Amino acid sequence: MRDGLTRRRVLGIGGALGLLAATGLSASAVLARRPSTTGAELRSAVPLPPPFRVPLPIPPVLAPVGPGRYEITQREASAEILPGVRTPLWTYEGTFPGPTIESRRGRPVTVTHRNELPVPTVVHLHGGRTPADSDGYPTDLVLPDRHDATGHGGHGMHDPRAVVSRLTRDYAFPLDQRPTLLWYHDHRMDFTAPAIWRGLAGLHVVRDDAEDGLGLPAGPRELPLMIADRAFAADGSLAYPSLDPDLRARPGVHEPYFAGVLGDVILVNGAPWPVHEVDAARYRLRVLNASNARHYELEAVTDDGRTLDLVQVGADQGLLAAPVTHRLLPIAPAERYDVIVDFAGVPVGGLVRLVNRLGSGRTRDVMAFRVARRAADDSRIPRTLSTDLPTWSRADAVAVRDFSFRTGRMHGGRGWLIGGLPFDPARTDVTTRLGDVEVWRLVADVHHPVHLHLVGFQVLTRGGRPPSPHDAGLKDTVSLRPGEAVEIITRFDGYPGRYLFHCHNAEHEDMGMMANLEII
């Protein structure tokens, strides 16, 4: 084994839990409380609409400009998110969410992004098996046409390996990966959180023939659901507590929101608490939590108080081996779940609410489905969904590494650290060989959804016990709860180069909670 065992002694589970006390959080208190969320809520200064009045929008599918070629312009736009109120946004192609890219497994695509925003941007295809030069490393900036390349702000760290382009950049995606729901979003160093909050997020679906042949609900009965919370200022703009509202020089948020920014409006596909008319049939819900920091625990509840099954068929990185049935489904920032809901037993005219058991007041509701009609349904949920999941075992691992995710000091103030260190693009934190299998043990002080770029992984243990039912399948983001340790296993295959792993609480990410992974 390589340096993993040394790291284990320094950053072991017991030591990481001990670090909680140094940050004002005793392990026993954290483990006893396990608060439902990490962060503070912004309150909107405009009247909010009643729930279940606005129809659910479906993001448009982007048309190619040529075989395997797409173009997206990042630009400012305004939209009527709250009824009767115009909200300025930063967008992909003028919409929030951005347009959906539909692709096929193994058919490469190139997406040309043009930056017409007032600040630099970076694009990351979250969950993509992507070569390093197209993965959206945080310092690989696309500058606006009239912008000083030396003045993009941030913590002032120099990255000698950064590849900076002006106005446009081609991102090449081989898509040699399992069919699944991916999403693309801004990943600029120090300013990811406010950029996503302002609208820079969209969906990318990968399909293949084997999945198409399963008979899962399809067409209008397959619904993408991008869930995101936001708050609105008195003028209708999106409220966000940036230290630098222009997002040019000083990263971070005002102190009350240091642990994460929560909004008091729940948007689904950019609409507040929407409603969608459905047949009395099965529907496939492709759910993404695109919130900066809010966690959800989803439940589908009928008018008469019955709870409908959420039959999970896929995780972050595609289909499960077999379906898993849930009544409650926890989903952390950046996680995706592919679930089937059957509305056949709901009377015509009945309402099914998708609720968040971790929310309170207005944030308890997410959206609703109105059963409009009886209809034929030839869909099915096969007992076997996929046979191509990896079969890694501990015996295959050439290294075991431990990482603590906790708050601490950085750059003269407070930040969020991995293994006691804030992010530095010039430092290599982990080096592994292409094709190696490793076990990573991750320990948290508060909630941290941990995301690995390039690779999917499997959850081995949670809190020293077997994985939870919602940990099934191949994932790229795992939710750590306060004081919790999670073991994951993965194979670092795909491509060599520099990649990231980080917390996907976007405020934590901006304030230091990223680390470099070098695959050689």
Image: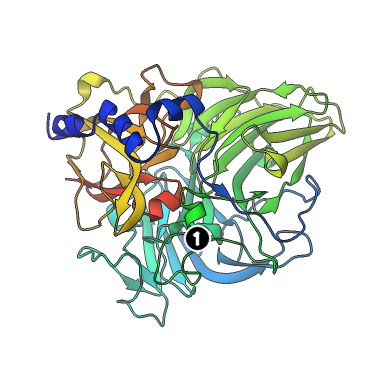
The answer to which of 166 and 9 lies nearer the viewer is 9
**Considering the numbered disc 1 on the image, is that residue within a helix, a strand or a loop?**
helix
Is 180 on the left-hand or right-hand side of 224? left
Quarter of the rendering containing residue 219: top right
User: Percent position (x, y) of residue 349?
Assistant: 87, 33
The answer to which of 110 and 186 lies nearer the viewer is 186
Quadrant in the picture for the N terminus: top left
The answer to which of 170 and 151 lies nearer the viewer is 151
Residue at 51% across, 30% down? 314
* Residue type marked 1: Pro
| Residue 365 seen in this snapshot | no
Residue at 36% across, 19% down? 464
Quadrant in the picture for the C terminus: top left
Q: Residues within 10 Å of mark 1 (few under 14, many from 20)?
A: many
User: Percent position (x, y) of residue 220?
Assistant: 69, 41
| Residue 104 seen in this snapshot | yes
For disc 1, the marked residue is: 194
Residue at 54% across, 21% down? 323
User: Percent position (x, y) of residue 342?
Assistant: 71, 26
Q: Residue furthest right?
A: 349
Quarter of the rendering containing residue 120: bottom left
Residue at 32% across, 22% down? 391
Quarter of the rendering containing residue 425: bottom left
User: Percent position (x, y) of residue 292?
Assistant: 51, 49
Query: What colouring method underlies this structural image?
Result: rainbow
